[in-house]
Image: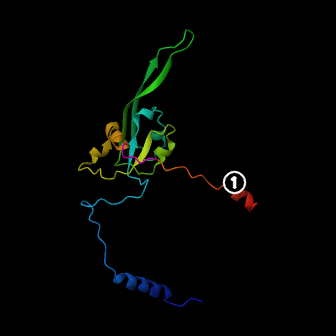
Amino acid sequence: MSVPGKGLIDGLKVTAKTLGRRSVTEQYPEVQPELPPRSRGVIALMEENCTSCMLCARECPSWCIYIDSHTETAPSVGEQARERSRNVLDRFAIDFSLCMYCGICIEACPFDALFWSPEFEYAETELRNLTHEKDKLRDWMWTVPAPQPIDPGPSVTSVEEEA
């Protein structure tokens, strides 16, 4: 059986506990915040890995990725070999005024060309300046932390003991 007003009393207890504590103010511009590892900031591009497959642009729900490319043919190596063609990236841009930061583009990329960078200070005074081209996205690539080591998982002996 519940006591009427119990939720109100519990809420007032929490308020009374925190009322005596001193508030902590982060002095943001002067003191940089400590970000958790692998925090999401901005999307970085490793241009060398991009094959212009357009999977990231197709999967993006907000259509904020713009890719332009052209095809180049490489000469044949052998006598009976045919010429190979490959896509060359001309333009890769992300409009961060439209981006939802969902990470679907990063997950969709089969060639590991897109990464989360912890950079979060990229404010602009005009909305049109939030479309960043591949040069800016490449500059953010060097701020991407190294991947965490793979979890070895449970040992084989512990699994056998449970069975």
Measuring 33% from the left and 60% from the top, which residue is drawn there? 33
> Which quarter of the image is occupied by the N terminus?
bottom right
Q: Amino acid at mark 1?
A: Val
Give the labeled residue for mark 1: 156
Front position in the image: 10 or 38: 38
Q: Residue at 55% of width from left, 49% of height from top?
A: 150
Q: What residue span does the magenta drawing correspond to?
A: 142-146
Question: What is the magenta segment's predominant secondary structure?
Answer: loop
Residue 2 covered by magenta stretch = no
* In the image, farthest residue toward the right: 163
Location of residue 37 in the rendering, given as x and y in whole percent from the top left corner = 43, 55
Q: Residue at x 57, y 10 (%)?
A: 80
Q: Measured from the top left, where is residue 27 in percent x and y?
A: 26, 65
Q: What residue lies at 41% left-to-right and 86% top-to-bottom?
A: 12
Spot occupied by residue 119 in the image (x, y as percentages of width and height): 34, 50
Q: Counting other residues with Cα less than 10 Å from the Cα at mark 1, is it few (<14), some (14-19), or many (20 or more)?
A: few
Q: Please identify the residue farthest to the top as the structure is shown.
A: 79
53 w.r.t. 23: above or below: above
SS category of the residue bearing label 1: helix
Q: Nearer the viewer, residue 1 or 24?
A: 24
Based on the displayed image, in which of its 4 quarters is residue 24 positioned?
bottom left
> In the image, is 71 to the left or to the right of 151?
left
Please name whichever residue, 95 or 36, is drawn nearer the observer in this view of the structure. 36
Please provide percent x and percent y for residue 131: 32, 43
Quarter of the C terminus within the rendering: bottom right
- Answer with left or right where residue 146 lies relative to residue 19: right
